[in-house]
Amino acid sequence: QKEVEQNSGPLSVPEGAIASLNCTYSDRGSQSFFWYRQYSGKSPELIMSIYSNGDKEDGRFTAQLNKASQYVSLLIRDSQPSDSATYLCAVNSFFSGGYNKLIFGAGTRLAVHP
Amino acid sequence: EPEVTQTPSHQVTQMGQEVILRCVPISNHLYFYWYRQILGQKVEFLVSFYNNEISEKSEIFDDQFSVERPDGSNFTLKIRSTKLEDSAMYFCASTVGNQETQYFGPGTRLLVL
């Protein structure tokens, strides 16, 4: 069974701090990795995608990928109260015919307090 | 910016009734998906659809479920005889390429009584 693991949290950080979210995955064949943000009762909203080892930065967000350790992380700099949400790590999983689907972690709840 | 849309936003139905959830994927996308999320649980893959046929389905997607792309824009999920445990948020997603980012619609909250 292919799994994606995340700490459920809550991760509580003060406004302006760096929030660090982590994710591990079991399928070594995975090639695409995504971070989605989900507000309560809403749909997943893409924050970042990352496909190769190393760091990828987009504004206040940095995704880090280490395929050897099967580890993905998301850093949020200068955290704002509006960043308070559940952050979902998603990893692609291939099946027959070369098609793929996303396997989601359970999400980490982030709370940014003023 | 193009978006995936879904209707209805909420659906309440009686156990044993049929429901159809509708989605309009982003217009140039070729791969379509349904996921569901039971309250407090993970987002789970149900089915993927490409080139007018199912490319993969999960064990959740049993004979009670079906998908269809009846025209060039709509993508539907039908549950033939709903069960209490079908109560969940159902998300449609689409992507332009097989490994590309999947964009999610706002979801349909289904409540089976």
Image (tube, helix red, strand yellow):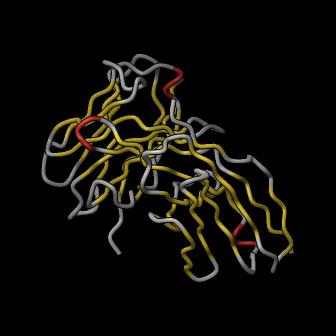
Q: What x and y, as percent, mark residue A17?
A: 82, 76
Residue at 59% over, 61% down: A37
Relative depth, front residue between A53 and B45: A53
Relative depth, front residue between B88 and A32: A32
Q: Is residue A55 above or below residue B73?
A: below
Q: What x and y, as percent, mark residue A112?
A: 80, 68
Residue at 34% over, 45% down: A100
Q: Is residue B65 above or below residue B16?
A: below
Q: What x and y, as percent, mark residue A79?
A: 75, 75
Residue at 38% over, 57% down: B102
Q: Is residue B11 above or below residue A79?
A: above
Picture quadrant of residue A84: bottom right
In which quadrant will I find the C terminus of chain A?
A: bottom right
Q: What x and y, as percent, mark residue B46?
A: 39, 34
Q: Is residue A87 above or below residue B50?
A: below
* In this picture, residue A73 sits left or right of residue B111: right
**Direction front: furthest residue:** A68
* In this picture, residue B3 sits left or right of residue B30: right
Residue at 63% over, 58% down: A39
Q: How many marks?
A: 0
